[in-house]
Amino acid sequence: MVGLAGGFSMGGVSDTDADAFQAALNRHATTAFLTVKAFAGHLDEQSSVVLFSSDRAIDPVGGTLAYDVGKGAVRTLAESLDVELDARVNAIAPFLIDVPGNREAMPDADFSEWTAPEAIVDEVVHLLSNEGVRGQIVQLTGSQSEVVA
């Protein structure tokens, strides 16, 4: 299994061994779970949590199975925690993030649909400050956002 910038692991079901699959779940879902678990006792109805999923959790593509499933687990974690906790829990699901490392790893890609870091910051601030938004998965592409859940 080959890694790429941004945490993508290349490989489909026949190319992904159990260790690589478990590593992706640990990197994405387990770390998000353990972080929220550490603070769960301090969260109340005034609290807000934003988790980081990926557009691959909404629109998976071939060849990145472990990553897609790991980020899909984060999406489900956000939805489940929003039901369980008093806090508002949402997730953002950006497309490729337009940072130098990703551009270097994929120099021939079309950067026009990549997600600007500023768009991510704006959406996180919106989700943290908007008391009416909860249990949402917000897909980000470029500077556009779309609620998918």
Image (tube, rainbow, N blue to C red):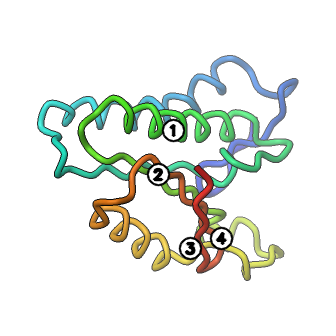
Q: Contact (CB < 8 A) between labels 1 and 2? A: yes
Q: Which residue is mark 3?
A: 99
Q: Residue at x 36, y 70 (%)?
A: 126
Crowd around label 3: few <14 · some 14–19 · many ≥20 (10 Å) = some
- Local crowd size for mark 4, using a 10 Å CA cut-off: few (<14), some (14–19), many (≥20): many
Distance from the alpha carbon under mark 3 to that under mark 1: 22 Å
Q: Which residue is mark 1?
A: 74
Mark 3 or 2: the one toward you: 2
The amino acid at mark 4 is Thr
Query: Residue beneath label 4, please?
Result: 141
**Quarter where residue 108 is shown:** bottom right
Q: Earlier in the sequence, mark 4 or mark 1?
A: 1
Q: Is residue 52 above or below residue 1?
A: below
> 51 or 111: which is nearer to us?
51
Tag 4–tag 1 contact (CB < 8 Å): no
Give the residue type at disc 2.
Ala
Disc 4 secondary structure class: strand
- Residue appearing at x 37%, y 63% in the figure: 127
Label 3 and label 2: CA atoms lie apart by: 20 Å
What's the residue type where badge 3 is placed? Val
Identify the mark nearer the N-term, 4 or 3.
Answer: 3
Instruction: Determine the CA span between mark 4 and mark 1.
Output: 18 Å
Question: What numbered label is drawn on residue 91?
Answer: 2
Q: Does residue 28 appear to the left or right of 58 in the view shown?
A: left
Tell me which numbered mark, 3 or 2, is placed earlier along the sequence: 2
Spot occupied by residue 93 in the image (x, y as percentages of width and height):
57, 56
Q: Is residue 35 left or right of residue 135?
A: left
